[in-house]
Image (spheres, grey):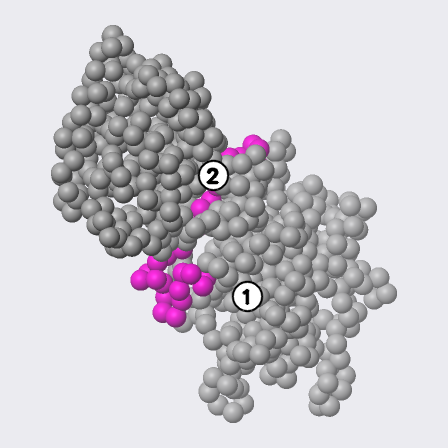
Amino acid sequence: MTRHIAAHLKSLALLSIRNIGDNTLSTGSSDSNRATIDSLDNMVKRQGEAPDNLLLPQAGDKNPPYVESAIDHQDFLPLDSFQSLITAESVQRVIKSLTEDNSIIQTLVEFVIMKAKKVFAILAVTGMEIIPALESLQQYEFTDAHLPITRDIDLHNCKINNVDRECNHPPAFNAFHSSPWDMVMLRTFYNEQWKFLAPVFSHDRRTQNLQLKCILPFIEPPFSHEPRKSSFFSDVYQVQIHPSHRSTQFPMNRNNTLLAIKELRPTSEMPDGFGPVNLFEREVLILEKLADFDHDHLVTLSGSFSRGDRHYILFPWANGGNLREFWVKDPRPLNREFMLEVLKQLTGLMHALCLMHNGGFRHGDLKPENILIFPEDGRQGRIGTLKISDMGQAQCHQYQTSRRSQPTQTRIGTMTYEAPEAVVSINTPRSRLYDVWSMGCIFFEFIVWLLEGPAGLEEVARDTRNGTGQATFFSIKPGNEGGLQADLQADLHSAVRRRLENFLQHEAWTVDTSLGDLIRVVSNQMLVIALPQGGSFDRGSASVASSLPAEPGAGLSASPEASLIFTLTPASSSSLPNAYIKQRADACTIMETLKRICGKSEEDGTYLLPSPKQ
């Protein structure tokens, strides 16, 4: 064991001296370095044959101790390898081979094992004289707790050769003022420390603030060909935490050790008016609060950290991709089992949105790409669990009301799924009902996919494109007072309205069936222009013509008394005394309706999905 570590010290000492390459440092300590290398030469000679090197990868090694970070492309020593190499036995043998003074041996071994294992490992790769270096560090109680040292500790008020210096650093750093430390060895210590300081991610949700040169313990996932996905604000890509760098309580599926890492763009790459720090802190805060819900249909926060001016958020990796990808690559036959699963998943999504809204949060960017799919273990042929993700545009409302005191003037979210008030009422605070419209668009597309497959979705996208080529689920027309933006009126897009009407004409599929009632939920509660009194979009400016014809009390069955769809609200306008207008419902109301649909579907297979003969 001793000769192995001696050879390791020799080779890494040579490597360290060779790679310093910093022309700002003094070279006055070359004699000391040469002496250290000579001492290591003598140690190896005393041990006899040339040994293998334990810490440097060797040709043919199946499990080399150093591992390359998939992000930084630098080697780090994983914690499990570190713990197996730096033991009381190995430390004692190394120190015993360097001195015959038993009191020194006992004192230094105890110091290393109790307080300075990482310090000892770093010294081993610097090529320093270990005994005097350890003695100086022990004298001033410099331990692993003081790591990492910063690059500038020897460049400001703290000068190695300044006898009258006044130092700003903690007393433990006085160890670096005495032999065998000099500027070369201090800088070498600084450069070599990082391979032993890769962080461990624990189960708590506190953000770790890492040094710029800290090596991230993420390894290349096996058989991974997942592309990096980019947006206005961030890149998302797949990584795998080295097993020894996550705590046993780390929030991760035991059968899926992959993570999604969201890396926010630096300030120079952000849209005007946005900064990565504020976006990062806001998203992490919201994710931490949402984690308290512990809801199956909300993506959970696995961790977060900052490194220099870069900010990162960790999530479980969704092996099933997102809902958009599912629609494109995974067509399913419409049968009762699958229809019930769809209903349950949509109900779960709306329940999650209800919790978010009741907690004072608005998502702000719901779209199929932000609905992730987590396959269920051992259950083939199922969708999996759909989860709402990407809280980058989420807002936290201070008060449990449907409006805020300041208008929402930014349009960063995906425009296809934005609500009409984002265009018609840009100077009015945006409500949480914005999310209901967006989810209504997703539900509508889900229905199209169920009935018409991917080709139907392509046709909807084509039919709803406006003059700029952007697909939207509503159209805009001038109001009665002209074409000013303040006078614009929104209307449900004719292509969407026409499709909903056509679906409902297939009576065998939509009269007293779950599918028909799901269509009515989308039509009567979600894709509705008008907002309730107190909402952020004036009900009086809504186009009544945009709504599908519906009778008061129309619902799940032919009998109004059995209706599970909410009763329409009479119009307050005296000019329409007998008319009814529809208003967009809140997420919790829709969730309750969907739960009743699911309950009836489980009891009545014909209601769930009629047989083809019907």
Question: Answer yes or no: do the residues labelled 2 and 1 have beta carbons within 8 Å?
Answer: no
In this rendering, would 449 be left or right of 606?
A: left
Span colored in magenta: 253-279
Q: Position of residue 513 (x, y in %)?
A: 74, 54
Query: How packed is label 2: few (under 14 Cα within 10 Å), some, or many (20 or more)?
Result: some
Is 400 or 446 nearer to us in this picture?
A: 400
- Give the residue displayed 56% in from the left and 77% down from the top: 429
Please state if 534 lies on the left or on the right of 410 as rendered: right
Quickly name the residue at label 2: 200
Q: Is residue 272 magenta?
A: yes
Q: Is residue 531 above or below residue 350?
A: below
Observer-side mark, 2 or 1, equals: 2
Q: Nearer the viewer, residue 570 or 531?
A: 531
Q: Residue furthest right?
A: 561
Residue at the (25%, 7%) spot, across then down: 48
Residue 437 placement: quadrant: bottom right
Secondary structure under the numbered disc 1 in the rendered image: strand
Regarding residue 105, the answer to whether it shows in the image is yes
Residue farthest to the top? 48
Q: Quadrant of residue 137?
A: top left
Tell me the amino acid under the disc marked 1: Gln
* Residue 10 x, y percent position in the rendering: 23, 22
196 is higher (above) or lower (below) than 533: above
Q: Of the residues shown, which amino acid type is indicated by label 2?
A: Val
Direction from residue 102 to residue 561 in the image, left or right: right
Q: Is residue 242 magenta?
A: no
Residue at 28 percent across and 37 percent down: it is 189
Q: How many badges with numbers are in the image? A: 2
Q: Percent position (x, y) of residue 577? A: 76, 87
Q: Earlier in the sequence, mark 2 or mark 1?
A: 2
Report which residue position mark 1 lands on.
395
Question: How dense is the environment of label 1, judged by Cα within 10 Å: few (below 14), some, or many (20 and up)?
Answer: some
